[in-house]
Image (spheres, rainbow, N blue to C red):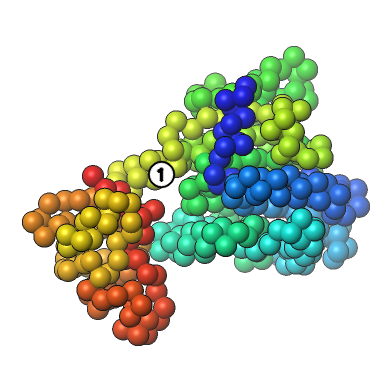
Amino acid sequence: MAALIDRFTKAKRVVIKIGSALLVEESEGQLRREWLLALAQDIALMKKRGQEVLIVSSGSIALGRRILKLKSGALKLEESQASAAVGQIHLAHAYQEILGEEHLTVAQILLTLGDTEERRRYLNARSTLSTLLELGAVPVINENDTVATSEIRYGDNDRLAARVAQMVGADCLVLLSDIDGLYTEDPAFNPNAQFLSEVTELTDEILNMGGGVRTAFGSGGMITKLKAAEIAMAAGCNMFIASGKIKHPLLAIEKEHAKSTCFLARDTPRNARKKWIAGSLSSQGAIIIDAGAEKALQKGKSLLPAGVSEIRGKFERGDLITLLNREGKELGQGLSAYSSADAELIIGHKSSEIAKILGYAGRDEMIHRDELALK
Ligand code: GLU
């Protein structure tokens, strides 16, 4: 068991997903402040031992509908969007206030599907989140429900949380919900269902263990959790399902006071990402880099425009490009932070000159080290 728990306690970057049913009390629709304060204390502990924490929180619609005094039962799309607009402000305020009691700085990020699914936009969201983490803040993320309609939605925050984990290269994702993990069958219907504390592969047998949706709020259920596991495991991120019904749910995982299911990733996020960069995209152009830049890359540094001497082909920001040295040897591939047109203007220049040359403040790197797959 200890080896499994290490995947949570020793993870560098952890995404915690909190379902609506935990945060919002079901009959009155009130925010469960004491529960959130206990969670904040768990997060403060994690931060103290050097872990970076991101929260993906549901609850805006559940909170907003009560404030707007909407009837119970299914809401129309416009009503959910209006509820989310009202509820999200309350939710963000509660996080700021309650996590603030533990001296945690909270940052709100509202994402739409394209922010993780389209490479150009994804680079933006990714670097904002990385900067927030470097600065010690705790990003609190939700879907931007006020503008998302069904075709352009994640739909459920389990999937959103897995996409966020993939985007930031997290090595652990914890889904806190009203169920403590994966059972061979839904334990609500079959008391003899077996609990699984470890899943190493998402076989058809495992995927068939996902039942339907049971909570009144939230759009989750075991099916969406298994979908999240698929995304996380492929991204080199371990995933836990644990019950959030108790106070201090994260401490409970760590101290093994409560059960949890761990879905084990085989790769590290870095390797999984490199495989994705090198294996699933086709190169749109090439750049020639000088010997100094080649050395810097071998040491794990990013590629700066100053080290690039030539651009070949036409590409857009976020496209995959091939790196060659002056002798024409292929060094690897990476996602470009600039289009070929802008890159032409800044190559050979210092990063501090980029804003003056292009008229906007772009990234310092031509290819960030996290977006590089060297040979
Ligand atoms: N984004 C929705 C909300 O904040 C929740 C989606 C979900 O429950 O998975 O209310």
Q: Residue at x 81, y 37 (%)?
A: 246
Tell me: 241 left or right of 308.
right
Instruction: Decide if residue 327 is on the left or right side of residue 266.
Output: left
- Image height of 333 relative to 305, above or below: above
The image shows residue 191, relative to residue 348, as above or below, that is: above
Residue with the most extreme left position = 327
Relative vertical location of residue 335 with respect to residue 45 in this rendering, above or below: below
- Pinpoint residue 155: horizontal percent, then vertical percent: 62, 51
The image quadrant of residue 207 is top right
Q: Residues within 10 Å of mark 1 (few under 14, many from 20)?
A: some
Q: Nearer the viewer, residue 106 or 22?
A: 106
Q: Residue at x 81, y 46 (%)?
A: 38
Residue at 39% from the left image edge and 74% from the top image edge:
362
Extreme residue in the top direction: 192
Residue 240 picture location, percent across and down: 62, 34
Which amino acid does the dot numbered 1 rest on? Arg
Location of mark 1 (residue): 270
Q: Quadrant of the N terminus?
A: top right
Outermost residue, right direction? 28
* Camera-nearest residue between 131 and 48: 48
Residue 241, percent from left and from top: 65, 34
Disc 1 is placed on an element classified as: helix
Residue 238 shows in the view: yes
Residue 92 rendering spot, x and y as whole percentages: 73, 63
Question: Above or below — where is 367 with respect to 162?
Answer: below
Q: Is residue 224 visible?
A: no
Picture quarter containing residue 244? Answer: top right
